[in-house]
Amino acid sequence: MKRIFPQIVTVLCLAAAFLFVLLTGSSYSKQPVSITNNVTSTVHKSDFIPFPNNSFHIKHIFHNSPVHKVHKRLDITPEFHQKLMMQSSSESVNAEDLDLFADESPFSHSFKLKSVKSETIRMANRDPDFVESYLNYALEVGQQEISKVNLDWQRDQISIPDIKDPETILSLGIMSSNAYANFPEDSDWEDVGLNYNLSDSYGWLNSGVRGHVFATDDNSTVVIAIKGTSAAGLASGGNQDTVENDKTNDNLLFSCCCARVTSLWSTVCDCYEKSYTCNQNCLEREMRRQDRYYKATLDLYRNVTHLYPFADIWVTGHSLGGALSSLLGRTFGLPAVTFEAPGELLATKRLHLPMPPGLPAELEHIWHFGNNADPIFMGVCNGASSTCSIAGYAMETQCHSGQKCIYDTVADLGWHVNMLNHRLRTVIDDVLKTYNETANCSKPPPCLDCYNWLFVDHSRDNWKSTTTFLTPTETPTGGNDDKKCLKRTWYGRCYKWEGDDDDDDDDDSENNTTKSSSATTSSTAITETPVTTSKVHEQTDSQTSTSTTSLTATSTSSKIPPECIRWSWLGYCLEYGPAKPSINTAVPSV
C-alpha cells in the first residue's frame, strides 16, 4: 500500500493540471516567436501619460541649406496631397519603403506613440537668442572662462517617449528614415529665413539639413526628425542628394582634427598644426560656422518653436541626423532618441553645450539605439582598411552622451560587424520589428576620444605678455615656429620651411642652438624683450601698445653642427659633410 500511494498522488496531480489547462486555455493567445531581451522595466503603469490624441502626422518639411543661405518650409496641406496623388506611388516615396506605411502615402500615415512622465533639469532661459549668445560667448573666451559663468537651472516635469514600448521606438525609427525625401517638384516652399535671390541659389534643395515635423492633432506634442547622411560608398540608404555637405560635416564632427588621418587626406579645415597636435580654438570656430549643420539645426529648432510655442518637442534621427538630434537635445534640454548615431560626445564638448552640474545620465533623456554589429555606432569604423576610410570618412569617435541602448545582434542573430548593419531600413526590419522588447538603456562606461592627440588652447594667447626675466640658460635660435612648412615626410615631420635658402634646406634646425650669456653686472632682474618691435594685444583689439628694447650681447659661442648631404626617405640624415662656418654678429645697443 505504501508503494502505491505516491503513484496515486502523481496521477491526481497530472489530472488536475490537465483540467486547469482545459478550463483556462482559451484565455491565452499564442505569441509570435521572436527574440526577447532580458530587461525588467522600471516604469510603472501609473507613469504612462496617454496623449489626448496620440496619433502623429507629418505637418511640415524644413530644408535649411546654409551653403546657399536658404531656409524654406513645405507645409503638408490638402493641396499638397492633391499634387501627390497625381504622381505614382513609386515617385512619391522610395520603392523599398512602400511597405513601411501599409501601401499608403507616408505623408498621410499615422504614428502611435506613448509617453511617460519624468523629471529633468535644464536652463531656465531657453530662448534661442539667449542660448546662441551664450554659445558665442563660450566660443570667444574658451572652456576655462565659460566654466565660471553661473547659469540659472530649473527642475521641470516633462513628458518623454516611452523607450520601453517597442511600437514607440519603431515609429520613431520610421520617422527618422529617408522615406520623406521625395515629393512633388512643384511643391510650394515658403521662405522662413532671410530673403535671398533664389536665382543665385540653384541646387539649394540638394544641399543642407532637412527636418520632418510631426505633430498631434491638438499640436500638444511635436517630433522633429532630422535627415541622416546621404553617403556615397556607405550603406546609408535613401536619397543621394546631399553627399558632399554631409561628408564634410561628418568629418568635422566625428574626426579628431579636421579628418587629418594621414598626409594623403584632404582636410575639411586648417586646424592641424603638427604631428598629432591640433588647434582647439580653430576646431570650435569651424563647428560654429554659419554654413555648418549645427547652426542649421539651431535655425530649424527656432522656426519650429515659432510655429508651436507651447508644445512639448522631441527630436530623433539616424546616423548624422541622430548626432545632430542629440546635440540639439543637449542644447535646449529636449528628449532625443537616435538610431545608429556615431559618437557625439567630443562634438558636445567642443561646442560648449550647457550641462547641468551633477545631472545623472538617466535624467538627461538622450537615448542612442543601435546594434553591436554596426561599426559606426560602435566606433570601430576606422583604420586604413575600414570601409569608412576607403570612402573618405574619418569616423574616429566612439563616445556617446546620455544613455546607450544596444541590441546584441551578434549573439542573438549571429550577425557579423558590417557596414550594411548601419542602414536604418535593416535596423527597422531585422531589429526593431524582431525584438519583443526594446534594448536595455544604460550609461556608457568611461570613454575618451582621440587620447593620442594634443589639442592646444590658444584662447589666452592675446593676453600673454612678452616681458620675461633673463636667466643664463641655453636659448634656441633660428627656430621655425613662425614659419610655414612647405614639405613634410609621410608621417608629418617637416623638412623644408618657408624662407629657407636652397643651400640650407637640409640643415638640422633641431641642433642649431646658441648659448648666450649677458655681461651686465647688476643685482637687479633684467627685463628681456625681442629685439624687433612687437605689438602686445590687450583685451580689446583697438588697444595696442608698442615696445622696443634691445639686448647687448658681449660674447657668443656656438657649436657648428655638421651639414647633412644625404637624407633618407624617412627624413633622417644618412651622410654628413663638412660643417659650414657661421658668422657671429653683435647686436648694437640702444
Image (cartoon, rainbow, N blue to C red):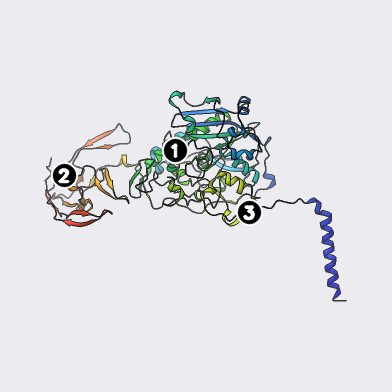
- Amino acid tagged 1: Glu
Q: Is residue 201 above or below residue 398?
A: above
Image location (x, y in percent) of residue 335: 57, 41
Residue 84 is situated, as x and y percent measured from the top left of the image, at 61, 28
Q: Position of residue 29 (x, y in %)?
A: 76, 50
The amino acid beneath tag 2 is: Leu
The residue carrying mark 1 is 244
Element type where label 1 sits in the image: helix
Quadrant (top left, top right, bottom left, bottom right) of the N terminus? bottom right
Q: Residues within 10 Å of mark 3 (few under 14, many from 20)?
A: some
Is residue 552 shown to the viewer in this render? yes
What is the distance, in whole Å, between disc 1 and disc 2 at their CAs? 55 Å
Closer to us: mark 2 or mark 3? 3
Question: Which of labels 1 and 3 is toward the front?
Answer: 1
Query: In the figure, 501 relative to 415: above or below?
Result: above
What is the secondary structure assignment of the residue under circle 3? loop
**As shown in the figure, which amino acid type bears the numbered disc 3?**
Asn
Q: Which residue is denoted by mark 2 in the rendering?
A: 551
The quarter in which the C terminus is drawn is: top left
**Alpha-carbon distance for marks 2 and 3?**
75 Å
- Nearest the eye: 41 or 286: 286
How many numbered discs, if any? 3
Is residue 506 or residue 451 the one in the foreground?
A: 506
